[in-house]
Image (spheres, rainbow, N blue to C red):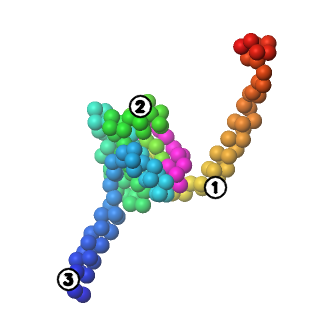
Amino acid sequence: MNSSARQDAVVFKNLHRWESYMAAVNLSEPEFADTVENNEIVLLDFWAEWCGPCKAYGPVYERVSEEFPDVVFGKIDTEAEPQLAQAFNIRSIPTTIAFKEGIGVFMQPGALPEDALRDLVTKLGTLDMDEVRAEIQSQKAQEKAVEPPVEKSGGGCGNDGCC
């Protein structure tokens, strides 16, 4: 094996070792959609530097992230990424959100205990997404069935054209 091949092997070995212990990564709006769409399971921790509970939750989130190298653990700073916080209607931090196959399947404000976070990730791995998609379709059909009819003439008072 020549020296170049040895270097490549070392780099690959180190890269593989790094991927095996992938820690939480900071996400911003530009890479958010790509991350959620191109990874089977993505957890997000919405946080801010000034938030005491966020500082306590951070090490827990980081430890659990190291146990699940195939799961992306993203961190979104609500101060730096207010548009993402607004898009998810984040009202309290920390808030944990989970996606599987690009679909949001879990959202909870507050710091999760370490065992609860670990259990969540384990359950996400076994979550039947065909059932989730069927439930989403069922809910959409029910919502459509209860939509009020659109009035074709006039306003809400019943007199044509006055409102």
**Residue 128 at x, y = what percent?**
60, 55
The answer for how far apart the CA atoms under marks 2 and 1 are is: 31 Å
Question: Total number of numbered labels?
Answer: 3
Circle 2 Cα neighbour tier, 10 Å, few/some/many (<14 / 14–19 / ≥20): few
- As helix, strand or loop, the secondary structure at mark 3 comes to helix
Q: For residue 3, which numbered disc appears in the image?
A: 3
**Nearest to viewer (mark 3 / mark 2):** 3
Circle 3 Cα neighbour tier, 10 Å, few/some/many (<14 / 14–19 / ≥20): few
The answer for how far apart the CA atoms under marks 3 and 2 are is: 54 Å
Q: For residue 94, which numbered disc appears in the image?
A: none
Relative height, residue 1 to residue 113 (above, below): below
Quadrant of the image for the C terminus? top right
Relative height, residue 156 to residue 92 (above, below): above
Q: Is residue 14 left or right of residue 109?
A: left
Q: Which residue is nearer to you in this view: 18 or 150?
A: 150
Query: Does residue 142 appear in the picture of this structure?
Result: yes
Which residue is label 1 attached to?
130
Q: Amino acid at mark 2?
A: Ser
Which residue is label 2 attached to?
92
Q: Amino acid at mark 1?
A: Asp
Q: Main secondary structure of the magenta part?
A: strand
The tag earlier along the polypeptide, 3 or 2, is 3
Circle 1 Cα neighbour tier, 10 Å, few/some/many (<14 / 14–19 / ≥20): few
- As helix, strand or loop, the secondary structure at mark 2 comes to loop
* Magenta stretch bounds: 99-113
